[in-house]
Amino acid sequence: MATIQDKSINDIRIDYYPTHEHQGMKFRRGHALPFGAATVPNGVNFSISSSAATACTLVLFDRGADKPYAEIPFPEEFRVGDVYCMIVFDLDVERLEYGYRMDGPFAPELGHRFNKDIILSDPYARSLGGRDTWLAEPNWDDVYPYRSRLAFEDFDWENDHPLELPIEDLVIYEMHVRAFTRDPSAKVKNPGTFSAIKSKIKYLKDLGVNCIELMPIYEYDEWENSKPNPVTGEMLVNFWGYSTVNFFSPKAGYAATGKFGMQVDELKTVIKELHKNGIEVILDVVFNHTAEGDHRGHTISFRGIDNKTYYMLTPEGYYFNFSGTGNTLNCNNPVVRNMVLDCLRYWAADYHIDGFRFDLAAILGRAQDGSPLSNPPLLESLAYDPVLAKCKLIAEAWDAGGLYQVGSFPAYGRWAEWNGKYRDSVRKFLKGDEGQVGEMAQRIQGSPDLYFYRGPTASINFISCHDGFTLHDIFSYNEKHNEANGEDNNDGGNDNHSWNCGVEGETDDIEINFLRHKLIKNALSILLVSQGVPMLLMGDEMGRTKKGNNNTYCHDNELNWLDWTLLKKNPDLYTFAERIIKFRKAHPVLRSSTHFTHSDYVGSGYPDISFHGTKAWQMDWSAYNRSFAFMLCGDHAKRGIIKDDMIYVAMNMYWEGLSFELPQLSHDRKWHVFSNTDMPAGEDVSQLGREPLVQNQDHIIVGARSVVILVGK
Amino acid sequence: MSFSINSNVSDVAEVGKVATIHLTGELDSLSARLFQKEIEKIALESPKDLVLDMENLSFMASAGLRVLIFSKQKIGPSLNIYIVKPQEPIVDTLEKTGLLHSVTIVDSYPS
């Protein structure tokens, strides 16, 4: 008996066959969802929405061709609401590049900027052609410079899965894909690429970081606003990448295989390999603005598709500029909100990304007229989304429009923040400012003054990040030195809270260099014993300098490239960083997910945390004081579930040494020295478990501008 | 350089069925379809080993990589894939896209 099983279901579905033909292209009515271009049997489904377009045309190119080989206007009956959709058959999906022409009014005062002469990128494109090789000169006359392409969601992930490490256990390493390995001293194949990260996984693992945070890897145009340096003539480019061209596409120029269009596979391969080595991947994502700039900028995609929907506009139809870069993405418009959500879900599900750090995230909480919302729907949607449920969500809780929400960012129990107040307090304390100990006591506890209800894990603690001085430069420069940026040193912040230790910039002075190393070790000590989530800036573990430049966004050179020879030049810094990271990972009492109670709730005889001065149990809170100590009771680790050692940290930022009376230990425990930053290299930090006994168990000398960490065991 | 492909399946003692495919020229998105058809044909014989002679293959696009993954999925995870004498750029591509550990590179088969 002939049964229906003799025939594949593929053969009897009528929607797998064309109904229309135009210029030899065969097509039929498509599916409104998903947006973007998706392969379907025998063809590709194209779907794009615009609230105000009057007509839409699909434009098809063969890869790299000057002119399109076909243009198919969407028949009116193919429109569903505001969505244009059609399935086109028999396309070579590997070579296909596609775009759209949108017709509609050009009426800026009404928010519309349609121009059907421009071929537009698909906001949902999964990969983009046109900037395939880093800084390869593009064809400036290209009729379609940023070309939407397909990507295939069939990567062989084997058993990979996002790691889902508890956020309090993370040690984050903020890095830039190209800067990490571009310098010849990295000695890798394909320097500056995704692929080259694989060669340095062992380094990251040995250092002990278990999460890398990648500065933007969404497709951006390094040529944007490029110009020769007025002084040196060297080309200044968009190196950092905080200017998105497409939110769904990885930057092709970061892939060694970008010229073959394999960036998607290459990036996924690196993520899979990092996961195998226990390292999570967080992406720095820029949803506050796009690369289209203000009314004078290029029309690439959003402006020509649905300007009024995608951007926050003034009543006159100009662009609000809360990002400081020309435009502001209209994140709390429901259409844009869904795009952001679709995008993050895609990265979480298809790239196995472990978390996201949102650049200028305060913008995501602004209403369509720019005013701050008390209950921003986008932030709420992200916090409760099932696909993103295990992803870390980290906000840079301020914007360039003056909204500063550190401590008050709408968190929904999910969001963590870059704690800008941690950075500022610790820097001021480290350089010896008065009046800091009160705030420092909060910062080392995970800033309960800011995150009382959210817990210490809301606080991403950092002292340096891509923006601003490196840790080395904080203690080598009083002022920024941004002349190389070509803006007469007017760009970049002036609130660096830095101290040059007596000489501006590099010096041969042995004492000053010793002091600088000591201050770096002080910073690493405090960062790694603070409750919350520590974040290191790439290279700070080896004394990386940007020569006093605190805004190196435009340099594809040594100002950004990590110089790996520093490992040989500053081995003491690397050793210190590596050991203090191990120390943190070995001691759960340093990684609490809840705030301290300042009481003894396990009957150990000690409160979970106690503060001390030069006299034990007596903290000097006065404004002129520059030193204090705290002790963590290991019996309270993880709310008393795990037994850990006692840990005592004494910080003296006074310019003379001080004797600290030590709290007495119970149960035959003795104090041992894990680290003392006042000691010369080799004696400054112990190997884990080999901490020498403190000779005098009653007192220790904490040298001038030094941090001492003791373990009671 | 134009692409050509031919294949055969033979019985090898102590192994079972071995499929051998000779690939010559450039494996781009169009030729990948031919490669895939060949794999589909071979899959009907359920070989234990798949031997890809790439000595004279100078380029492989992502479509070609996908066919490699497809072979495993179509024939089964127990399939051993041997690549004979691949040129350096091909090895490079396999490495960067993470496929290198799914295949065995050999100078000849049987080695």
Image: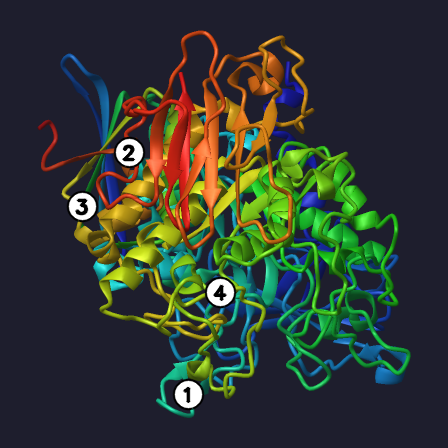
Quarter of the figure with the C terminus of chain A? top left
Residue at 49% from the left image edge and 56% from the top image edge = A464
Q: Amino acid at mark 2?
A: His
Sequence-first tag of 2 and 3: 3
Which residue position holds label 2? B101
Whether discs 2 and 4 lie on one chain: the answer is no
Residue at 82% from the left image edge and 60% from the top image edge = A366
Spatial CA distance of label 2 from label 3 is: 14 Å
> Can you tell which of label 2 and label 1 is closer to the viewer?
1
Q: Position of residue A127 (x, y in %)?
A: 53, 58
Q: Position of residue A299 (x, y in %)?
A: 67, 78
Residue at 55% from the left image edge and 71% from the top image edge = A146
> Can you tell which of label 1 and label 4 is closer to the viewer?
4
Q: Amino acid at mark 1?
A: Asn
Q: Which disc, if any, is residue A498?
A: 4
> Can you tell which of label 1 and label 3 is closer to the viewer?
1
Which residue position holds label 1? A229
**Residue A254 seen from this side:** yes
Q: How is the image coloured?
A: rainbow
Total number of numbered discs in the rendering: 4
Q: Is residue A433 left or right of residue B34?
A: right
Q: Is residue B30 left or right of residue B83?
A: right
Circle 4 sits in a helix, a strand or a loop, which is it?
Answer: loop
* Circle 2 Cα neighbour tier, 10 Å, few/some/many (<14 / 14–19 / ≥20): few
Spatial CA distance of label 2 from label 1 is: 45 Å
Q: In the rendered image of this protein, does residue A475 appear above or below residue A385? A: below
> Can you tell which of label 2 and label 4 is closer to the viewer?
4
Q: Chain of mark 2?
A: B
Q: Which disc, if any, is residue B86?
A: 3
